[in-house]
Image: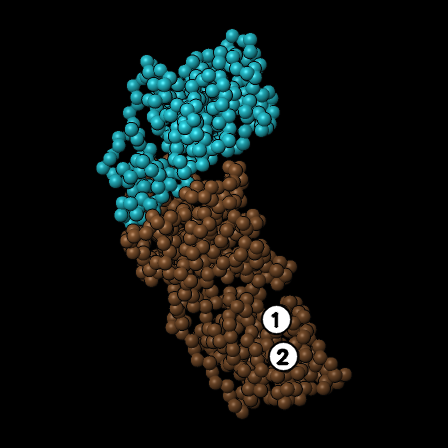
Amino acid sequence: MLARVNSVAHIGLISVPVEVEVDVAEMGFPSFNIVGLPSKAIEEAKERVKTAIINTGCSFPRHKITINLAPADLVKDGSCYDLPIALGILLAGGEIAGNDTLNKSLVYGELSLDGSVRHSKGVLLVAIFARRNGFKSVYIPKNSSREAAVVDKIHIFPVDHLASLISHITGKNSIKRQKRVVIDNLMKQADSEFDFSEVIGQEQAKRALTIAAAGGHNILMSGPPGSGKTMLARALPGILPPLTSKEALEVTRIYSASGLLNPGEAIINVRPFRFPHHSTSLVGLIGGGSKPKPGEISLAHLGVMFLDEMAEFPRSVLESMRQPMEDGKVVVSRAAGRIEYPANFMLVAAVNPCPCGFFNHPKRQCICSIRQIERYKRRISGPILDRIDLHINVPFVEAEKLAGSGIRAQTSTEIRKRVTAARQIQTVRFGSDGEIYTNSQMKNKMVKLYCQLDQDEIRLMKMAVEKHSLSTRSYFRILKVARTIADLEKKDKIKIEHLAEALQYRMRVF
Amino acid sequence: MRVLEAADKNFPAGLKKITPKVKKLYSKGNFTKNLFIKSLTVVGARKMTQYGQRVIDNLLPPLVDSGITIISGFMYGVDQAAHKKALELGGKTIAVLGWGIDWSVGASDIKLYREIEEKGLILSEFENDLKPQLWMFPRRNRIMAGLSRAVLVIEAAQNSGSLITAGFALKFRKKLLAVPGPVTSAVSQGTNGLIKSGKAVMITSASDILNVMNWHESVKKKKSQPVNDSKDIIIKLLADQSLTVDEIALSVGQPVDKVSVKLSLLQLKGWVEEKEGKYYSKMDLT
């Protein structure tokens, strides 16, 4: 007898339907074969499925079993076909009788030898696929069901064991539907290691980070060791605005597809903050591998990627970020296919001014030669620096200079309120533009539209272009930063003071 | 390019008396004999600090206005800053190279090189495209000391090349001048040492140099400096020190974003300048 169960395959973040066809033939020697370009993990499903069925108390048909994963020319991978295969065998072997609702359902999940269903990756994508393609219900692992529950208008059946799926289908004991999870209720504020008020001094750096967070601008901090670059970056999550539900769904898709959601977790509810070490490979950063996986830049999508000691990263790795930084996405082409991952991240980078780190230090002597320093500075190429909106110096702070200064530092919560308000202005501004969330993502055309200057402002920019020999690209960067500064002050028009402040953060050779 | 033999009548007089003898001199640019009449060799550290830059910004304008030729060694740091300042002020400058006259300089130096070639003079004792090697720089230094009437040292570390030039200046009985620096700075140890040991005359202003050298008679009227808007609290603050944005904000008691705005505007007016994250005043300090 032949049985068909619907399931899904993921190619990157794109899901395609897969039909699991199971035939249990009356004639022929008992055997168990899977066809349809299965990977090693799927080949091994045979053992898991057979053992799970037996351990659930059902009989495994002693016949010739053939499984086809259609379409047959698409390479399939992963352990999520265990459940549909097991169900198909039981249906085709006549162990249980199917019902019509199965035609409109997706089955997805990995089996354990005792028949229980394990947390599987990509469940959110399954639910989204089901919703878009007119499926009524999905059967997914119970541990992962909250992921799917953010999608509305489909029935989600959390399956904890093969036995409960059987009794649900035979109508003995139906599975309770997973309640819908409302994303907005799950949003929370990220915890950061430090509060901004704990960072002593570095007022300019804090101000620049506030602007960066408000407009999603890339920022480069240059300063000697011990000046607080890393601490500032680590404090950054505390001032980032909370994710919107639309953003959260986008981020969670990536994390779900890469299996980075924990069992029971419904959604990524804080902005990602990734800090890859400088030994990270190109594939690790950009994404790739024989089965292309998202890299750090995609995992930092809509969040922050912090590159500490940026000059220590291999040049080739840094250069590979050029195109994703410009486009907000990365296309990974491998033998297994061409996959596009979103990569719209805010880059926070920290560098030392020279190899020894003490160039221009008030107390320590720099031991590098000028040539060494120049070579060190060239390690980050012009095009990469050109894509960074804010460039700041984080000088060494002499503690005694600050003692008793009496200035009360702003807390992260206070700063975050202003950042969030500025982001809301941007959300309204770009509401109709779809893809764009922040000022930093504006293309030149939009800069011209949203950053219009009056006569006085144009005159100032002309002077600045001449004085600092600004390139066209830096000119536009300054306008974008000025736009964010104006947004922080809730001003419609970009004024001289906004431009003047933005000029402070222009690119220098760090 | 032009070649000058020691016997040539145009051969700089200052070089005829020094040892080891200079046999030949290659030149590029505008060679005139009066270039050397009133000339000052300016040498100093490659790792110039903002202090060195400020000293050059302050000392050189009156000298260049008095028609003094600035001679230096085309090294990065003080040397190139002195060349640049002289050119910027429309003055005369001579670069004495420590390598073959035809050796092509790096991309970062080429702009200045062309400018000196066009408006000033480039000299070298070494022919063709001989690459710079360590032994050539002390030889070059003796020419720099020999060409001019006096050697001014701005920022020099212990055991630095600038001190070699200073040594030649004493040997050739030229006037040795030095600008004192902070006792905490490594690149002021050499200059302070020269002053302390009595080998160099301490220089604290351009008029010191003009006095010592008796260059007064031909001093032209000093060009007017930008007006010191002393009402501005930031300009006042930066008059005698270079500070980071944070330090300025702390001193004037204003938020850092407001201070940033002011600094940008002052910078566009050319009243303050920024180097390696620190701001300093471009106004005449005297």
> Which residue is situated farthest in the front direction here?
B197
Residue A126, position as x, y percentages in the image:
52, 72
Other residues around mark 1 within 10 Å, as few (<14) / some (14–19) / many (≥20):
some
Can the viewer see residue B14 in this picture? yes
Residue B27, position as x, y percentages in the image:
53, 18
Q: Quadrant of the C terminus of chain A?
A: top left
Whole-angstrom CA distance, mark 1 to mark 2, is 13 Å
Residue A152, position as x, y percentages in the image:
44, 75
Given the image, what chain letter belongs to the residue carrying mark 2?
A
Q: Quadrant of the N terminus of chain A?
A: bottom right
- Taking the spot 36% from the left edge, 43% from the top edge, the residue there is B244
Given the image, what chain letter belongs to the residue carrying mark 1?
A
Q: Which chain does the cyan colour mark?
A: B
| Sequence-first disc among 1 and 2 | 1
A52 sits to left or right of A378:
right
Q: Quadrant of residue B224?
A: top left
| Residue at disc 1, secondary structure | loop
Apparent colour of chain A: brown
> Which residue is situated farthest in the bottom direction here?
A172
Q: Amino acid at mark 1?
A: Gly
Q: Which mark is residue A78?
A: 1
Q: Which mark is residue B192?
A: none
Q: Compared with residue A214, is residue B112 higher up or lower down, i.e. above or below?
A: above
Q: Compared with residue A445, is residue A192 higher up or lower down, i.e. above or below?
A: below
**Who is closer to the viewer here, A293 or B235?**
B235
